[in-house]
Image (cartoon, rainbow, N blue to C red):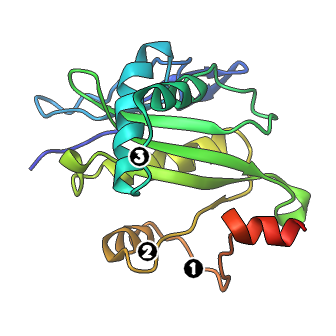
């Protein structure tokens, strides 16, 4: 059985933080076992992240062109925003020898509890070839670390009610389920609501 570790080291505004500078990380030493690195993406990750984003869109039955996937990857690989920013945060999982195998995109929400800012998991995606190997768990753990490191009050997300494996992992993380219903306006319904 493979073990995966999340190892990151660096500074953010001069204080210790589990996340290195853009595109940098130091993997945990897990002897001779394969190591999964979770970190912020850098420019060198654009091609690999574009491949992952294209796979994600096919998985969600909304394929995009290679150029659209690359454009999205370039946006995701921009320098990390300052902690007080409302810019999205992106983390990637990278397996040896540098293949991007997962990502988590976090949006800032405001106001949250007591007028604080929180993070919302907009999307967590793991490549089909490496599912059920702890990649999603590592990304969620790293997102929780980032939430604390940057002073956010909470980490929220939704899950497809039919996705039992994901819900089981989320339940095991200790997350509470909230009594909310998720809504979306899109397409004709959005146009009608705007009229």
Instruction: State the mark number for residue 177.
Output: 1
Residue 41 in the image: state x and y as whole percent.
Answer: 49, 25
- Number of marks present in the image shown: 3
Res 103 seen here: yes
Mark toward the start of the polypeptide (2 vs 1) = 2
Outermost top residue: 44
In screen coordinates, is 72 left or right of 127? right
Give the vertical position of 161 relative to 59 (above or below). below
Q: Give me the residue at 46% from left, 32% from top.
A: 69
- In the picture of the structure, the residue carrying the numbered disc 3 is 63
- The numbered mark, 1 or 3, whose residue comes first in the sequence reads 3
Give the number of the mark in front: 3 or 2: 3
Q: Is residue 151 left or right of residue 97?
A: right
Quarter occupied by the C terminus: bottom right
Q: Earlier in the sequence, mark 3 or mark 2?
A: 3
Identify the element where label 3 is drawn: loop
- SS for dot 2: helix
- Which residue is rendered at x = 34% and y = 31% of the image? 51
Question: Alpha carbon of mark 2 to alpha carbon of mark 1: how far?
Answer: 8 Å
* Pointer 2 residue: 171
Picture coordinates of residue 173, whole percent (x, y) = 44, 66
Residue 66 in which image quadrant: top left
Task: Determine the secondary structure under disc 1.
Answer: loop
Badge 3, how many Cα within 10 Å: few under 14, some, many 20+? some
Q: CA distance from mark 3 to mark 2?
A: 30 Å
Residue at 42% across, 38% down: 53
Indicate whether 35 appears above or below 120: above
Question: How far across and down, in percent of the image, does residue 79 sit?
Answer: 63, 19
Mark 2–mark 1 contact, CB under 8 Å? Answer: yes
184 left or right of 176 in image: right
């Amino acid at each position: 059985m493979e073990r995966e570790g999340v190892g990151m080291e660096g500074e953010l505004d001069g204080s210790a933080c589990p996340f290195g500078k853009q595109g940098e990380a130091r993997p945990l030493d897990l002897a001779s076992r394969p190591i999964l690195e979770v970190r912020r993406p850098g420019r060198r990750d654009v091609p690999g992240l574009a491949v992952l984003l294209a796979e994600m869109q096919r998985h969600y039955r909304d394929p995009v062109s290679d150029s659209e996937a690359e454009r999205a990857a370039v946006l995701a690989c921009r320098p990390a925003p300052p902690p007080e920013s409302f810019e999205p945060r992106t983390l990637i999982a990278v397996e040896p020898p540098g293949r991007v195998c997962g990502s988590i995109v976090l949006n800032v929400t405001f106001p949250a509890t007591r007028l604080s800012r929180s993070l919302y998991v907009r999307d967590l995606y793991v490549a089909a070839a490496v599912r059920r190997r702890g990649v999603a768990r590592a990304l969620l753990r790293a997102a929780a670390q980032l939430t604390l490191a940057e002073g956010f009050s909470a980490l929220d997300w939704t899950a497809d009610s039919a996705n039992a494996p994901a819900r089981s992992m989320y339940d095991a993380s200790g997350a509470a389920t909230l009594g909310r219903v998720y809504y979306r306006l899109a397409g004709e319904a959005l146009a009608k609501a705007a009229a």
